[in-house]
Image (cartoon, rainbow, N blue to C red):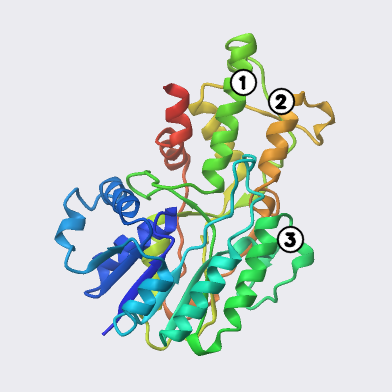
């Protein structure tokens, strides 16, 4: 018998993972702190991802929402929980600026690892980011060694540190699932949670709003200067395909890989994403420039915020899905212009602009 504890169930991937485990298995699923917030997020996600408004009710006998910490749940339900899935959150304070330069919470993960060892959990799964590769471009293998010298921000450096910490817990048969940039559902386009993709959209919407507050609808006519490479590739993974692939692979008994890329074989150009975003926001298409020296102050601020997400929008890495190629099928989803447009139009940042 298997039971799952999902830590980070209010995160974009975490909420979808809970739903996938309920939908694809007959096992108990635990999620924690605070239970009321988790339930609200899960209900919203179930509706947004096409599971139906009664999805949680239909699985209520297997879904255990607790107000205790994950460590307390592991202590109380030690015999019932055999696998932990940890979706780490980032540490933020009231002074945290918008952007992606926020470290993951390593202290929380360390406490969870210790509790999992005490509970004799059979496997500890960590949802990490494929962008631990940092500034290294080109083909990135699952087996490539981690090297903090390539990290471009605190998020990437702390993610490397967290992966190393998890790898040391050999008694838990640890497995790291490195994901691309998580985006909304492949069919409904909805996203209950956020990711660097939505951070980019939010930064762009705020930039447009700030300009309009000063000079009116200038952005519909004047091309915004952006010091980014339109041809650099970004790895976009719809949240439903991400959790489906991860859960499917995890349930293959012969799977022995300690690190697995859950990424997208079909790369998307950053320019395609920005074209969809500028179109949806009613902005003139951007002017790609070689440096911020020719940018206005507000354009430099936008550039700095996007670059705060580290490798995600600048490295152009291609993540090889060697494990999936060996035991299943690599995830391959073409993010067409129609999909990107629908994804952007359904996003919270765009809704806020329209509001």
Q: Is residue 91 left or right of residue 311?
A: left
Tell me: 333 left or right of 38. right
Mark 1 and mark 3 residues within 8 Å of each other at the beta carbon? no
Question: Badge 2: how crowded within 10 Å, few (<14), some, or many (20+)?
Answer: some
Quadrant where the N terminus lies? bottom left
**Which residue, given by chain and number where applicable, does mark 2 sit on?**
298
Q: How many marks?
A: 3
Q: Is residue 188 visible?
A: yes
Q: Nearer the viewer, residue 165 or 21?
A: 165
> What residue is drawn where x is 71% and y is 42%?
229
Alpha carbon distance from label 1 to label 2: 8 Å
Residue labelled with disc 1:
210
Residue at image coords 52%, 34%: 276
Mark 1 crowdedness (10 Å alpha carbons): few <14, some 14-19, many ≥20: few
Label 2 sits on a secondary structure element that is helix
> Earlier along the polypeptide chain: callout 3 or callout 2?
3
Report how far apart the C-alphas of labels 1 and 3 lie in the structure: 31 Å
Residue 284 visible? The answer is: no
Are circles 3 and 2 on residues that touch, CB within 8 Å? no
**Which quarter of the picture shows residue 217?**
top right
Sequence-wise first label, 1 or 3: 3
- The mark that comes first in sequence, 1 or 2, is 1
Residue farthest right in this picture: 293
Quarter of the image with the C terminus is: top left
Residue picked out by circle 3: 151
Q: Residues within 10 Å of mark 3 (few under 14, many from 20)?
A: many
| Residue 355 position (above or below residue 21) | above
Could you say where residue 98 lies in the image, as x and y percent from the top left? 62, 39
Q: Is 188 situated above or below 8?
A: above
Identify whether 262 is placed above or below 79: above
């Amino acid at each position: 018998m298997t039971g799952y504890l999902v830590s980070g169930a209010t995160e974009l991937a975490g909420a979808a993972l809970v739903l996938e485990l309920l939908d694809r298995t007959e096992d108990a699923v635990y999620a924690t702190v605070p239970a009321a917030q988790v339930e609200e997020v899960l209900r919203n996600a179930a509706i947004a991802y096409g599971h139906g408004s009664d999805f949680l009710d239909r699985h209520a006998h297997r879904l255990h929402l607790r107000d205790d910490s994950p460590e307390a749940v592991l202590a109380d339900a030690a015999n019932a929980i055999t696998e932990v899935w940890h979706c780490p959150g980032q540490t933020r304070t009231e002074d945290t600026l918008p952007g992606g330069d926020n470290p993951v919470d390593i202290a929380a993960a360390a406490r969870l690892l210790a509790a999992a060892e005490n509970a004799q959990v059979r496997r500890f799964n960590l949802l990490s980011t494929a962008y631990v590769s940092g500034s290294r471009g080109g083909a990135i293998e699952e087996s490539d060694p981690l090297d903090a010298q390539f990290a471009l921000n605190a998020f990437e450096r702390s993610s490397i540190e967290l992966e190393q910490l998890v790898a040391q817990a050999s008694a838990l048969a640890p497995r790291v699932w490195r994901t691309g940039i998580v985006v909304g559902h492949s069919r409904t386009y909805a996203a209950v949670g956020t990711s660097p993709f939505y951070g980019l959209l939010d930064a762009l919407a705020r930039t447009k709003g700030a300009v309009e507050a000063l000079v009116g609808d200038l952005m519909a006519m004047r091309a915004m200067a952006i010091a980014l490479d339109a041809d650099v590739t970004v790895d976009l993974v719809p949240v439903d395909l991400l959790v489906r692939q991860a859960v499917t692979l995890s349930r293959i008994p012969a799977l022995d890989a300690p690190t697995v890329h859950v990424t997208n074989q079909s790369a998307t150009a950053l320019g395609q994403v920005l074209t969809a975003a500028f179109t949806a926001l009613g902005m003139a298409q951007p002017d790609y420039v070689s440096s911020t020296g020719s940018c206005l102050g507000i354009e430099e601020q936008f550039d700095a915020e996007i670059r705060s997400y580290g490798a995600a929008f600048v490295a152009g890495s291609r993540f090889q899905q060697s494990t999936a190629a060996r035991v299943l099928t690599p995830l391959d989803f073409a993010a067409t212009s129609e999909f990107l447009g629908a994804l952007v139009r359904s996003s919270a940042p765009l809704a806020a602009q329209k509001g």
